[in-house]
Image (cartoon, helix red, strand yellow):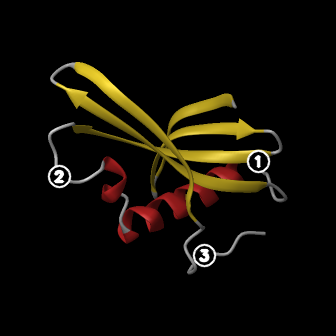
Amino acid sequence: MKFLIANFRHERGEIDLILRDGESLVFVEVKTRSSGGWTRPAAAVNSRKKRILSKTALAYLRQVRLLAVTFRFDVVEVLMEGDVVCEIRHLPNQFPLDRSYRYG
């Protein structure tokens, strides 16, 4: 994957990372948690967060004028023990564009 931008902000929200994977764009949400927690960090990407990410991704696509591109939403989990990273998991294609939004 090729890195494009970090911390893309728009009035609708923020996307942690935007990458290109071949011909597709990848919008990445990074979630960091202590390894002693009961749930995986990706569980924090709830329906509200998915709507925010969807709106922000569409704002990015409009801003850069990409009208015909495929894209997906990935999650990266970072598990910490104190100040030490003990695990990083890349979870590709975790959810589709929120159904209430249209692209194209």
Foreground pick, 72 / 8? 72
Please tell me whether mark 2 or mark 3 is closer to you in this view. Answer: 2
Amino acid type shown at disc 1: Ser
- Residue farthest toward the bottom in the current orientation of the protein: 100
Residue 64 to residue 55: above or below: above
Helix, strand or loop at label 1? It is: strand
Foreground pick, 75 / 49? 75
Residue wearing tag 1: 24
Q: Quadrant of the C terminus?
A: bottom right
Amino acid type shown at disc 3: Tyr
Please tell me whether mark 1 or mark 3 is closer to you in this view. Answer: 1
Label at residue 38? 2
Whole-Å distance between the Cαs marked 1 and 2? 33 Å
Q: Is there CB contact under 8 Å for labels 2 and 3?
A: no
Mark 3: few, some, or many residues within 10 Å (few <14, many ≥20)? few
Q: Position of residue 97 (x, y in %)?
A: 60, 68
Q: Position of residue 47 (x, y in %)?
A: 39, 71
